[in-house]
Amino acid sequence: MKKDKGTRNLSGDAREGDQKKWMLESIEIDRMADIPLNDDDSRKPAFTKNTSTSGSASSHGKYIPSTPAGLPRNSSTSPALPRDASRVTSFRRLISTARKRSNGAPPKMAKVQRTASSAARGLQSLRFLDRTVTGKEMDAWKSTEKRFNQFAVDGKLRRDKFGVCVGMGDSKEFAEGVFDALSRRKNISPQDGVTKEQLYSFWQEMTNQDLDSRLQIFFDMCDKNGDGKLSEEEVKEILVLSASANKLGKLKQQAATYAALIMEELDPDHLGYIEIWQLEILLRGMVALDDGSKVTNKKSQSLAKAMIPKAYRTPISKYKSITAEFFSENWRRIWVVLLFVIVNLILFFWKYNQFYGSPMYQITGYCVCVAKGSAEALKLDMALILLPVCRRTLTKLRSTFLHKIIPFDDNINFHKLIALAIAIWSILHTFMHLACNYPEISGCPREKFMALLGPSLDYKQPTYADLVNNTVGITGIFMMIIMTFSFTLATHNFRRNIVKLPWPFTTLAGFNAFWYTHHLLILVYVQLIMHGYYLIFKKPWYLKTTWMYLLIPMLFYASERILTRLQETKHIVDVIKAVIYAGNVLALYVTKPQGFKYKSGMYLFVKCPDISKFEWHPFSITSAPKDDYLSVHIRALGDWTTELRDRFQKVCEPPTVAPKSGNLMRMETRATKKRADTSNEYEQDQAIFPTIFIKGPYGAPAQDYKDYDILFLIGLGIGATPFISILKDLLSHIKPSGRGDKGDSCGSMTAPEKYPERAYFYWVTREQGSFEWFKGVMDDIAEYDKNKMIEMHNYLTSVYEEGDARSALIGMVQKIQQAKNGVDIVSESRITTHFARPNWRKVFSQMANTHQSSRIGVFYCGSATLTKVLKKLCQEFSLETSTRFQFHKENF
């Protein structure tokens, strides 16, 4: 990082002293952790007299601005809630200052000497190219030069290829605006294209470390006619370009409104234009507001490092402590898996020893021992694999003391572990028979065979074909084929439809293929019983143990499935509303069956017999336990969910009544048919909707959220759904009594319950329309949570991070709108939306410092790519701080 040692000049007019004072009150030096600053020097900016008038025009007729502090590049610092009054007040004061000074002439500001910190912030502001801030500028130019050689025609790069060439290919319209601005400055016709030398000069200006240069490019990009002034129409055009580059469709439609808002705030005298210095003031204020949170973050990180206990300071003690923490956190998983492995090995070696030295062993050797040992372990595993999918039973057991010693949340993972063991034992058993035992028996010398195995086979030595062509051989081969087919389609890539198969095999990938092939395993169990009963070597029925292993688990599983089937008639629900949101999301509101008791965080299964009479799909419950309805939010990703969305979309109609303020049902602004007053009309309305069945509820990790001091909820996209019910439950606890407590159909808790002291909800999504799903909840958090028990952070990853030129104007509008009206322009709620992705390490560091010696429950629902990162951070900060983070991931 380079320091800018140049000093900025101050105009010597009568207002010089006042301007010095204003600047020093408005700029705070950011003390970077690894760059020492001299306190005395930092408070004494160097000023020099300049006989020229401040704010004079350049040779091109443009105003040369003073140097502002830059926008922070990293947007992942977690600021306080947007409801923080100090931040809003500070920004309002900034707007007021800008308006007071916009009396026709730009203010004559003192030019503050740049420190290393301010230069760093300036470098991170208004970036046009991402890769040029890595310290390898020439490497970035080499890539640009290579693309120029690829796309240039007759030695010139056309305007439409400029974005791809410089690395802004995903923001074509914005890149073309930059190209036009730079071309005007160089007196180049945009239609003629640019040579490599001209492109290099463009690239140098875009990567110039001086913020003034990049600010001037940004202003020129807005100033289409080059008169040095921005009209409302020009502000609107650049807003449209920024909205397109950041995939903000709604903002693009409302560009005229927000352009008028900017003009209203920065042009109070109604001159019809704003100038570059006014944008500069706005940028400087945005940096000043964000600096406080960055300094706090750095202090939090330093404090977290200082809190490392002595037990973790040496490699050996740290290793011991990490090992102890691992066993402390995972002891329930460890003992269950260890017991499973030990029992499997005991059965294997018990059967192995039974056949060691037997007549069969004298012919086939160790092959028969391995085959029989693997068969015995396989019988147990085929029985155990049914238990983790008995969801009704597991949900009841979660409420007992057993949940303290058995990890019921890992039922699907244990199911997969048993499936892996079944695959290993099956392959081993089949290979030993087909490749070793059968060849040895059929090829054994006749005299030896008759002496050892003749009595068991009526003194007839079978051929290899005889050993395969019987009940045991045929059922064994068919079982292997079905299990191979079923297990393959149950793998992640096939189940999630990641594998793209050629026609006509396209139907073999996806949830439907997984669902139906898994039900083929019923045939496997039938054949397994036959395989273990009709043996080649005859024995009494009470010595045939296969059916003994399978009897109880199969009856247990079958009874649960039959009971669920019989209770389907009780769980036919009426559709109250169906809401279609942007992002292919269907919000389904249905009646709550009598006696349907659940906790926040649980999930249920939904079936639509109009689509399929057999398919059940799990979805998190998004309504609160005290609500008199049930709701789920379903994203159309597969065949079944897409068909369900399409069927409800056919009967959807626009809302006719505006939602009432303060009502959690405000998220239903795109509601379909309303519930009629009369029964006849109501029945007619129900006939329009597809038939819906539900079963459940079933336990999930998030239902134990009340066990923790602090909640840390993380949802990616539609992964926010398990936590919406929790937020609603917390809101019902916060709200004044008498509104949500009446008629509690759950009949649940009457005594005061323990709730977490505070809840943090981080919602990361890539689509602006996603915020519509739970807009009502977000507004209720802002309205009712006066004590800030719930802290919500929305992140929109489609928007370029703060400091990028493509999102700079959006950030300005967002700050103005939040300060003026208290509404975020992205989510259209009172919760501020941050750009790009969170920096999870900084979030954990801040939380560990804020909540020392607390138990924080980290609940995550989303893609598996972030699971390892979050889990590692939980372990790391649990070791290095006094705070304990316990990680839970939602599994269906």
Image (tube, helix red, strand yellow):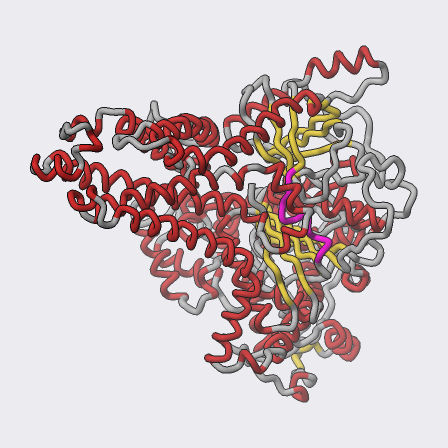
User: Residue at point 73% right, 77% down?
Assistant: 24
In depth, the one of 493 and 314 nearer the eye is 314
In depth, the one of 889 and 252 nearer the eye is 889
What's the magenta region?
A: 698-707
Would residue 778 be counted in the magenta stretch? no
Q: Quadrant of residue 80?
A: bottom right
Q: Position of residue 763 (x, y in %)?
A: 64, 49
Q: Position of residue 460 (x, y in %)?
A: 14, 27
On the question of residue 516 being in view, the answer is: yes
In the rendered view, would you say 31 is above or below 708? below
Most common SS among magenta residues: helix
User: Residue at point 35% right, 57% down?
Assistant: 143
In depth, the one of 274 and 589 nearer the eye is 589
Q: Position of residue 600 (x, y in %)?
A: 71, 44
161 relative position to 325: left or right: left
In the rendered view, would you say 307 is above or below 655? below
Q: Position of residue 700 (x, y in %)?
A: 63, 45
User: Residue at point 70% right, 73% down?
Assistant: 27
384 relative position to 227: left or right: left
User: Residue at point 57% right, 62% down?
Assistant: 329
Residue furthest right as drawn: 738
On the question of residue 192 being in view, the answer is: no
In depth, the one of 744 and 53 nearer the eye is 744
Q: Where, quadrant-wise, is the C terminus in this rendering?
A: top right
In the rendered view, would you say 262 is above or below 611? below
Q: Quadrant of residue 87?
A: bottom right
